Image: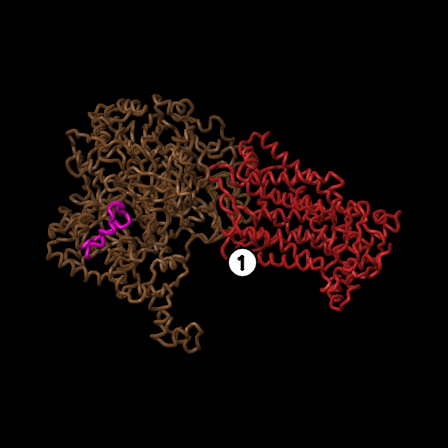
Chain colours: A red, B brown
Amino acid sequence: MALPENPNLIELPEIPDPGPDEILGPGHNYATVTDRIAGVVFSPWSRWPGKWWIGAIIAFGFVNLLMLAMYVLFFRGIGVWGVNIPIGWGFAIINFVWWIGIGHAGTLISAILFLLRQDWRTSINRFSEAMTLFAVACAGMFPILHLGRPWLAYWLFPYPNSMWLWPQPRSPLEWDVFAVSTYGTVSLVFWYIGLIPDLASLRDTAPHPWQQKIYGILSLGWRGSAVHWSRYQKAYLLLAGLSTPLVLSVHTIVSFDFAISIIPGWHTTIFPPYFVAGAIYSGFAMVLTLIIPLRSWYNMRDLITLRHIDAASKFMLGTGLIVAYGYAMEAFFAWYSGDKYESFMYWNRMTGPYAVTYWLLILCNITLPQALWSRRVRHNIGLVWVISLIVNVGMWLERFEIVVTSLTRDFVPSSWGTYIPTKWDWATYTGTLGFFMLLIFLFVRMLPSISIFEVREVVHHQSHPKATLAEKQR
Amino acid sequence: MKQSLIPLESLLEAPKKDAPDLQAIREKLASGRGPAFWRTLDEAAETKELQEYVEQEFPGLSGQIPQGVDRRSLLKVMAASLAMAGAAACTKLPKETIVPYVRQPENLIPGLPLFYATAMTSGGYARGVLVESHLNRPTKVEGNPDHPASLGSTTIFEQASVLNLYDPDRSETALHEGEISNWATFTGAFSTEAQDIAARKGEGLAILTGQTTSPTLIYQMTTLQSQYPGAKWYIHEPGVNPAISGAAKKIAGKNAFVAYDFSQADVVVSLDSDFLNNGPAALAYARQFSKKRSVDNGNTPVRLYAIESTPTVSGSIADHRFPVKSSAIPSIAYQLAKACGVNAPDSGAASPVWLNAVAQDLQNSKGQCIVVAGEYQPESVHLAAWAINSALGNVGKTVRLLEGVEADNTHGIEELTGDLNAGKVEVLVILDSNPVYSAPGALNFVSAIRKARLVVRLGQFFDETSRYSHWHVPAAHSLETWSDARAFDGTTTIIQPLIAPLYENKSAHELLSILMAKPDQSAHDIVKGYWQSQLKGGDFDTIWKTSLHDGWIAGKTVNTINAGGTVALPNLQPAIADLEVVFRPDPTIGDGSWANNGWLQELPKPQSKMTWDNTVAISPKDAQRMNVTIGDMLKVIVNGQSATGPAWILPGHAENSVTVYLGYGRTASGKVGTGIGYDAYPIQQVNTPWNAPGTISKTGEHYRLANVQETQTMAGREPVRATDLVEYRKTPNFPTAEEPPLDKATTLYPPWPYEGYKWGMTIDLNVCTGCSACIIACQAENNIAVVGKDQVARGRHMHWIRVDRYYAGNDIDNPEIYNQPVPCMHCEDAPCEVVCPVAATVHSNEGLNEMVYNRCVGTRYCSNNCPYKVRRFNFYLYSDWNTESLRGMRNPDVTVRSRGVMEKCSYCIQRIQESKIQTEKEGRSIRDGEVVTACQQVCPTQAITFGNLNDKGSAVARKQALPRNYGLLDDLNTRPRTTYLGFVRNSNEALSGSTRKS
């Protein structure tokens, strides 16, 4: 069945999923790919699905809540949150780590899977990269918001000043500044470079002159010449190489925020690998949470197929097992070390005032995702979507467990405390969720959420099955 | 409601329109919703009537103003404002010509504080203090080392009194029937009244004061009474038990004081006494006791038995503590007396099992033991204690009877109430006392006071009593005026002012002087005049100046009375069989007079570690029986009257007994103290004010208490390390015997060479009583903010030094109690320093862990990583930057912190710097003991030692070399500079069944 060229996407009949073995539905040629993906961007306002409007408006409402929460925070002080002494870090750091973790999937998919020549990445890499950027944007807010004097946040950067004062390089928070800002910058550049050929496609297919102008400027004069492509491939490969270590380094350094300290529950050598695995785990969960509705709303089941969902589920399963190993080792060493603080800490996690969060986290992160071993579960889109949501919650609980429960009861019993988040904690958290969702909503409307040229490469590759893309590049 | 608030009949009758709802206005203003400036109560209430009135008087005005202003009016208003601003700024200055310094006054060097010796009184008795003054602003109170009732220390109250001086809620002008008036008007009116009184020979004149030892005041009152024989002097001191002086009077036959000498005592038995923390000589006792408790010199330390109902500061460091109902103490005292050979009437109760062992211990230390009678026990206990001390030969050795210095021939509040009700009092002059609030409820003083034709009140605040007074005159703080006072041993101090009264404040001397037809005399003239007449022989000016300089007048101590005869012990009432309700002044705000002091409100109560509220303390057994948890509201009913307060389960409290704390539930204390806690005075009885039979019941409501320590036990860790004396002699290094501290070389880096000073601190847990004076001293020295109940409940209190209280042992009904002051440890390998991204907390080359406020961005990572959790964070702008009067109070050498920065103990770096500057000028190094931290200076038991660890001869270096020295959490290799000396309990082996062992 050949698809009609230049279809009106919204009115297309339900396009079936080609199944777990295909990364692309049948009947596509270069033009249909472009039309299908660009069609989402160029469909008139009136044809935008109602779900988009509802979602975007709700998300916008939460952005306003975020603004209000930030205003209250800046005006009154950090005391509006539930943090105290001994629990100096609360929701802000939990959310920071959570968002940064989510931000890991994009680069992993784009860079590492690119280097590993996983062709199934093509239809989800653009979207995941965008998700990464937005998650990093949300994450980046928190370290600034959580400062006692946020207006002095720039002191964390090494800028020349008349005081001759530099940041203190031994602090992991300082490493964080560099890790996160580097990651954010590289992710942005990588994403943008990847967008250039598609921006040119949009320029060429845009129905209105103003759209042509905007996409024209953004596409930086891309003409699609062989020289362009040759240089482009090199640049993309180099950036992929540059991004790859970052995937591992960012969350390693974020984990140092805890591992470098002496607090029981934080001071753990297993943190770097376990944090990275957890990050990828939550990243894939968020990708699944987002692409499953996306492909359904925009009839892209033939572009984002069961194969993608299956692969992402397997990634979740694998990284989830690493995370489970991390938990097991934490518990084991709490016992094996014989350290009274460490063993008390773990016992307190399991039986203390926050025990509910611990057991919920075990349920969400370890127990329930084991269902993904089953092929039937992996191929049940609805179930995968629910599991991805559960993993998102579980990973958030994990950070709550690490950040808060460890701080509530550390060394001196007299100074143990309780942490209760306030309404402004929740407002800030849900506000960033709204911010993230609004950016996603805007992104799918304004930019090609699936890489057009890479899917066209897949089309090309499928029409010449013997010469694979990878072979040609070699 | 309205009527009970303002009883003045004129006020009630005068208004034709509806009287403004005063309660509503009060609440409105207190909540901050009302207008910031208001001239009349109507305006404050923002009533319709006022708007109508304005409309009638100035047609068009009320509509014009809110609609904006035209240019001409704006300029007019601005010109007027400028003129007014100039005028307003001048109102505080006298009209005399101002002359600038041409020559700087001697000794006054801006930036260098001066110290003046004066005294503060507690229950009328003096405690000598040295007050630090920065450019004539008193900022900090220290004990006067030369004064026998201070010895250089103070209690929490002297420390906190500076805040009272600068309290923005203090009354500023005289008020006549609620209308603003002034001293001159009052003087005129009162002089006229005085003439009438003189004509009546004082008939119908009643003067009510607190307890006093002031020679000038006593002289003034004596003179007044000789001039006006009809005048009567009443004394109301709600926190003091008159039985103490009553018993002493019976023993001596005249005004007397029973004084102890703990420096010679081997065995001390406390009969419900908090002698280390309460009473005129508490600081002296604490010092003597702590010296005697030392174990390091090989001596056998003093053994303390505490027999008490409510756990007290003294009881917390007892070697054996026996919880006994307060009402059962008299019979125990009698049994003890019998066992010690005193002919005491039969108490009719069975003796407790431990009694004989205690009596035997006393018998074994004849002449070297003390039985201390409780401050709130009846005369019988005081007499029995005296009889035991006599029988054991302690009198003349460890116990002395001193001539009394209190005012004599005075009457009590019960008598005043009777006289008022009988219509015998026409003019009532109340000096400082607040009987409307603090008289026992059974007296119904409120109805009595209305019977007086004229009530004149001298008070620092417009409080409950002032509301019922026709004239209210603002009283001067003791740092603002001249007076005098005597210590328990007669040492007399001239109270000299450090600052002119901030407002139109007057002293009791000046007010009394009006009555004696000398309205123009200043307090200075009165006090100096009196002493001029007393100190004859020698050059008065020299004596005067020396006395002012030293803080005491030479040769004024009293003599010891040689009491010969034995005192017959009265027959006893049986102990309260059912539930007894024990009344005690609150541990931090006393009888309620300190209720408006934020420092004291936020000071954790020594036992419960609870702030901003009073509780009903209940034993764990009673709580279990009644199914009560902490914070459950309990209704306490005594003699038909009830008070309702939140429960606090207090381990170590006697069973079948609850303690209610006086001092809370104030209705007119000021912005801080009004409306918090519950008022226990209404259920206090007249004849048995300190314990009474009662009942308690749960109301079913729950109340949120702000507690600074959630976990009460050591949770299997050993922050406090304790042992028994026998064990200590076997293993003197018991704190580190099981787990030796890590080798100092457990690091890859070479140790930092400290070439100059290397500061360190040691805290002796064996003598810390947990009195918490260090917390308040630190607060006053370091400008530490008060955060309020809500923030404390959220875990955000700001104290740089805290006193942790741990319960240990197997018996929740009578646990071991340990106190542990925790300031910053100034770790050698400080975990906080490495994690700060902006280098806001750094190590100095003298070993201090320094906090750079203006570099701090507030990541709070340092606090997270501090294993001791001594860091405090300004979650909001906690320091009051706006209230004008509080600015004068601040220590100019310490930064007032702003929002969003971390702070913590600095080892009083400003004091170190001051000494360094001084010694560098003199070309020498700082001597041991020259730099004293605020907590160290105030400590009544000298538990805290600070100094240079590089100086091997320094006190701190010697203490850190002691075997019982250990570092808190030293297994973390933080290498703390603040170390602790382990607790050693001198248990009696005969009581091994109830001996506490750790």
Compared with residue B273, is residue A286 higher up or lower down, i.e. above or below? below
Left or right relative to B780: residue A138: right
Chain under label 1?
A
Residue range highlighted in magenta: B427-453
In front of the other: A374 or B757: A374
Q: Position of residue B357 (x, y in %)?
A: 31, 22
How busy is the neighbourhood of tag 1: few (under 14 within 10 Å), some, or many (20 plus)?
Answer: few
Element type at mark 1: helix
Image point 67% across, 60% down: which residue?
A53
| Whole-percent x, y for residue A97 in the image | 61, 46
Q: Is residue A244 magenta?
A: no
Residue B800 locus on image (x, y percent): 43, 44
Is residue B443 magenta-colored? Answer: yes
Q: Is residue B490 visible?
A: yes
Drawn side of residue B603 relative to residue A461, left or right:
left
Q: How many marks?
A: 1
Q: Amino acid at mark 1?
A: Tyr
Q: Position of residue B629 (x, y in %)?
A: 43, 38
Q: Against B43, is B411 above or below?
A: above
Front residue of B252/B62: it is B62
Left or right of residue A54: residue B751: left
Q: Quadrant of residue B961?
A: top left
Question: In this view of the protein, can residue B543 be seen by the observer?
Answer: no
Q: Quadrant of the N terminus of chain B?
A: bottom left
Q: What residue is disc 1 on?
A: A71
